Amino acid sequence: MASPNRPARLNRTLLLLVAVVLLAAAAFTLLTAFGVLALVSADQTLTPTSLSPPTWVSYVTILVAVVVGLLALRWLLAQTQRRAKTGTWRLEADPASGATRIDAQDAVAPLVDEVENYPGVHRASARLAGTASRPMLYLTVGTEDAADITDVRRRIDTDAVPRLRQALDLSALPAEVLFRLDDARSARLS
């Protein structure tokens, strides 16, 4: 099942590219300013004095640069937040009597099929993360504009998730459900 956040890889790649360009520009500027790179002599002006901006422009530029830098840092930190990984689960009450292993993605396939058959739902994807002792279900549901979201959510809470929890013999299964409202054109294309 595809990740519900497909642009994330492109987003991180563009962030890295912008960061490399900005770091290279900053390094070039600092190396030139301290005389390591002798491209311009220290007493030579870069712009004519008639083009010199007022002093307040420098302060505003620095303030804007700091704010943009902090926002970029926040954006970068947001990219590193990840959910727990999925994998193979061991389901056994008594290891001496045998072990049962199941791929977490295979375990959620019936849940996805069930949710996709609800009225107004045209696609669904799920990811079961964590371990059998600390599970977490991430469910993304694509619905039509006219779908009854309340009814879909009620059926997920009362039918689909409890059925999965019972099948996996879990005492609790916290779920994070993300609804994506799509128009009729995108529903037909997917």
Image (cartoon, rainbow, N blue to C red):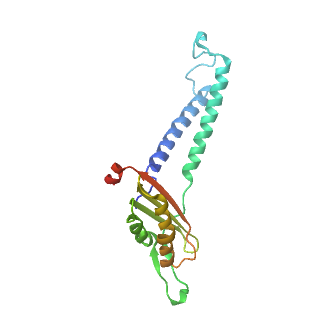
Compared with 88, 149 (above or below) is above
Q: Residue 30, relative to residue 148: is it above or below? A: above
Q: Residue furthest bottom?
A: 97
Q: Is residue 75 left or right of residue 185?
A: right
Q: How many marks?
A: 0
Q: Tell me where residue 109 appears, x and y as whole percent.
A: 41, 69
Q: Quarter of the image for the N terminus: give it.
A: bottom left
Query: Which residue is at a point 58% across and 74% down the rendered structure image?
Result: 133
Up-down relation of residue 12 to residue 135 (above or below): above
Whether residue 80 is situated above or below residue 124 in the rendered picture: above
Q: Nearer the viewer, residue 5 or 10?
A: 5
Camera sees residue 34: no
Q: Nearer the viewer, residue 40 or 64?
A: 64
* Residue at the (51%, 70%) spot, across then down: 158
Residue at 49% over, 60% down: 150
Measuring from the top left, give residue 87's x and y in whole percent: 48, 69
Considering the image in quadrants, where does the C terminus appear? bottom left
Give the image quarter of residue 75: top right
Classify residue 180 as left or right of residue 80. Answer: left
For the view shown, which residue lies furthest in the top direction? Answer: 50
Q: Does any portion of residue 174 appear in the rendered image?
A: yes
The spot of residue 145 in percent (x, y) is 41, 52
In the displayed image of the protein, which residue is found farthest to the left?
Answer: 188
Q: Is 189 in front, or is 38?
A: 189
Nearer to the camera, 156 or 81: 156
What residue appears at the point 57 percent right and 77 percent down from the top-left corner? Answer: 171
Apparent side of residue 86 relative to residue 31 in the rendered image (left or right) = left
